[in-house]
Image (spheres, grey):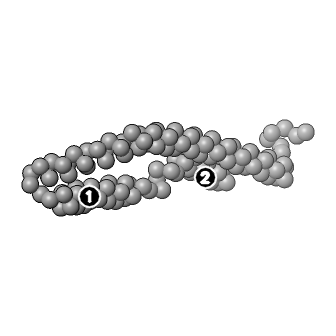
Amino acid sequence: MQSANNRSIPELFSDALGQLAKLVSNEFELARAELAEKASKAGRAGALIAAGAVFFIPALVMILFAIAAALMHAGLSDPVAYLITGVAAAAVGGLLVWVGLSRISGDALKPKVTLEQIERDKMAAREMVR
């Protein structure tokens, strides 16, 4: 084999392609690991949300009945008290859904570390070509 200073262009090109293939492989591994971590966090968060909902929904129903009972005790008829309570609960629920949907974005799910590493690798590849 020739010394590092006397290598032919095909050898250098072959080495560069080998390094590029390894780099791409490493980037895919990084992306896979990062996405698996995010999916795991999302799964755990979903389980906690579901567990919280199991307790929250019956409590909310009881609170709404108490509000309706207070309105009836204040002198409103039963149907009007239930209607006011239901409309208010629907408005709050709709507002919460709207705010939640407006906060969902692709940025939260992007593999940021991988994208930053790819940008660094692109800059390094450009420097090598020069």
**In front of the other: 90 or 15:** 90
Q: Position of residue 66 (x, y in %)?
A: 22, 45
- The residue lying at 48 percent from left, 56 percent from top is 106
- The amino acid type found where label 1 is placed reads Gly
Alpha carbon of mark 1 to alpha carbon of mark 2: how far? 56 Å
Quadrant of the drawing holding the N terminus: top right
Q: Is residue 120 in sight in this rendering?
A: no
Q: Position of residue 121 (x, y in %)?
A: 61, 48
Side of 113 relative to 19 (left or right): left
Side of 11 relative to 48 (left or right): right
Q: In the image, is residue 36 above or below residue 17?
A: above
The residue pinned by badge 1 equals 86
Marking on residue 122: 2
Instruction: Name the element at disc 2.
Output: helix
- The residue lying at 29 percent from left, 59 percent from top is 90
- The residue lying at 50 percent from left, 40 percent from top is 47
- The amino acid type found where label 2 is placed reads Lys
Side of 18 relative to 24 (left or right): right
